[in-house]
Image: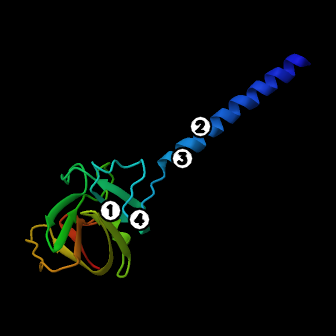
Amino acid sequence: MLKNLVNGSLILLIIGFILIAIYVQKKEDQIVIDATYNLSDSYDEVKCQNILIISKINLNKCMNINDVDKDIAILYDSETIVLASHSGNANNAYFKNLYKLIKGDEVIFYHQNSKNIYRVVDIKTKLKSDQLSFANKNNQLILITCSYTKKDEQLVYYLEK
């Protein structure tokens, strides 16, 4: 009887440790960013100067490699900021759900030590073979990705503060 009680207690103890480990791991996976640009331990403040958050599509991405084949790339950075990423099913397809955005949706971009809140104001479809040109105006963010359904097209999202 005592042996069964000890074995049962050990099993409960092991299950308890497993549940605590799962809870701690989930807590560490959370990313918290507040309005003063304090980053949680999930992002290294020195390495992560640009963070793109699109809650509607569950995107919360530290952008630390300016290469569209590995990350979200900053193609242009002046009054207008242009970001590009792949869509599709690959690991680097950070904009795979961008097609779900509609006019009025919110995008947060931490850039140059400030929090910038943008809203989608226009969405256009362009041929990949066309040259893209944009008016360089203040408070504009442009997101570019391949069309998920048509291989010869790309989607261009215009956002403003």
Residue situated in front as seen by the camera: 73 or 37: 37
Residue where numbered disc 2 is placed: 21
Mark 1–mark 2 distance (CA, rounded to whole Å):
29 Å
Is 129 rendered above or below residue 3? Answer: below
Q: Tell me the tag on residue 99.
A: none
Nearer-N-terminus badge (4/3): 3
Residue where numbered disc 4 is placed: 57
Amino acid type for the residue under numbered disc 1: Leu
Please tell me how crowded label 4 is: few (under 14), some (14-19), or many (20+) other residues with Cα within 10 Å: some
Asked where in the image residue 111 lies, by quadrant, the reply is bottom left
Q: Is residue 43 visible?
A: yes
Nearer-N-terminus badge (3/1): 3
Q: Residue at x 79, y 27 (%)?
A: 9
- Location of residue 1 in the rendering, given as x and y in whole percent from the top left corner: 92, 19
Which mark lies nearer to you, 1 or 4?
Answer: 1
Q: Secondary structure at mark 3?
A: helix
Label tally:
4
Residue where numbered disc 3 is placed: 26
Residue situated in front as seen by the camera: 89 or 50: 50
Is 65 rendered above or below residue 115? Answer: above
- Asked if marks 1 and 2 touch (Cβ < 8 Å), the reply is no
Nearer-N-terminus badge (1/4): 1
Q: Secondary structure at mark 1?
A: strand
Amino acid type for the residue under numbered disc 2: Ala
Nearer-N-terminus badge (3/2): 2
Amino acid type for the residue under numbered disc 3: Lys
- Location of residue 58 in the rendering, given as x and y in whole percent from the top left corner: 43, 61
Of all residues, the one furthest to the left in this rendering is 131
Mark 2–mark 4 distance (CA, rounded to whole Å):
28 Å
Mark 3–mark 2 distance (CA, rounded to whole Å):
9 Å
